Image: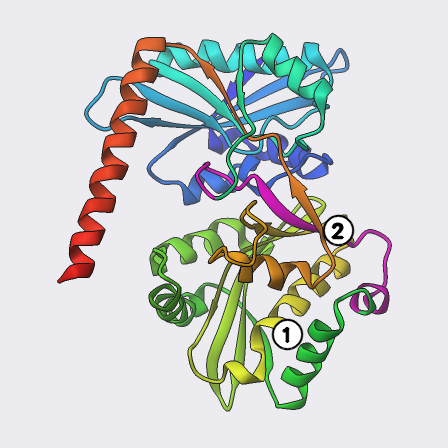
Amino acid sequence: MEIIKREQAAEFDAFVKSHYKASFMQGSPWAGVKKNWQWRGVISRGADGKIDGTMALLIRKVPGMPYSLMYSPRGPVCNPHDRAMVKKLVDAAVELGKEFNAYVLTMDTDIKVDDQEFAALVKSLGFTVDSTTQSFETIQPRFVFRLDVEGKTEDEIFNAFASKHRYNIRVAKKRGVEVKICGPEAAEDFHKIMIETGKRDDFGIRSTEYFRSILENFGEDARIYLAYYEGQPIAGSLAIHYGDKVWYLYGASSNAHRNVMPNYLVQWEMIRWAIETGCRIYDFRGVSGYLDESNPLYGIYRFKKGFSGELTEFIGEMNLILKPFAFRLVTLGEKTYKKLRTIKRRLAEKK
């Protein structure tokens, strides 16, 4: 087993990109985005010397405590049913955790919830598995929409959309909405629209620097799609292509000109990117698992569902507790912090 740092990751990244379990969060460019975390890559090699399994780890010290969280987002990258391989990667991560005084190893592999073989495997290695969360309480969403684009033409994929979605895409084109593919130079315009969206829909947003960092670290594998109407940017999305997938990471829309349906055309252009690059999957990312029209987040579900993807429920977060006392202490601290943050927000709303 090998443990590498980011500057040694060329071979590591090539393997991740080539694997069907590839995730942009398992590639080393993600380390450049997560500046407050340390990054390490675990490598397994076969008898021929070639890489046959990897695990990217983000490590961050808990504020005010001597412990660290060790997290493998959407890892590991290997055959998830190969117990010997998974164990080998996990054992190496645990050994690394001693260097950082890690209290837990957390994973959230994109394995479906009904995969009993994988659930039994990780439980046999000592992990606890949380398959109960329904919304966005976990680090990565448990529920996503995924669209199978492998081997399909644009017409085949477009014609499978809900009729209203096809209509809205045509409306955007007919009314003159133009979608431009942009890089870091568009981060500020995109951020301005995100601010407007966050205020309207009541959610926190990332900084301009964060969006720019994604674009700079992933290079040609990351894009901002900006929709222009009458010369002004009115909607946009940030997407990443990595391996055999394209992910829709962030989306925003102005309060003005929503009637020209820019978000539908932006989604279609990102899906076209997945088709053009020969991807297997276009990933719409998270939705709430509460599929009830009374849910305030139901509109996100309805929007993504109309593109005819598959609602996919993953197994959830898995924790290998390395220091039980520290785990209880940190968990209690997190719950207290969330309660205080909620109280602070409600007090601010009353002013």
Q: Secondary structure at mark 1?
A: helix
Question: Which of the image's four quarters has the C terminus?
Answer: bottom left
The residue carrying mark 2 is 279
- Residue 156 colored in magenta in the image: yes
Which residue is at the front of the view, 48 or 105?
Answer: 105
- Check disc 1 and give the amino acid type: Leu
Residue drawn at (40%, 64%), measured in percent from left and top? 201
Identify the image quadrant of residue 137: top left
- The answer to whether residue 224 shows anywhere in this view is yes
Residue drawn at (29%, 30%), measured in percent from left and top? 334
* Numbered tag placed on residue 48 in the rendering: none
How many numbered marks, from 0 up?
A: 2
Q: In the image, 56: left or right of 114?
A: left
On the image, the x and y values in percent for residue 111 come to 66, 31
- Check disc 2 and give the amino acid type: Cys
The residue carrying mark 1 is 265
On the image, the x and y values in percent for residue 88 come to 61, 11
Q: Is residue 169 above or below residue 213?
A: below
Classify mark 1: residues with Cα within 10 Å, few (<14), some (14-19) or many (20+). Answer: many
Q: Is residue 261 above or below residue 86?
A: below
Q: Is residue 317 above or below residue 234?
A: above
- Residue range (magenta): 136-158
What is the distance, in whole Å, between disc 2 and disc 1 at their CAs? Answer: 20 Å
Closest to the camera, between mark 2 and mark 1, is 1
Which residue is at the front of the view, 57 or 173?
Answer: 173
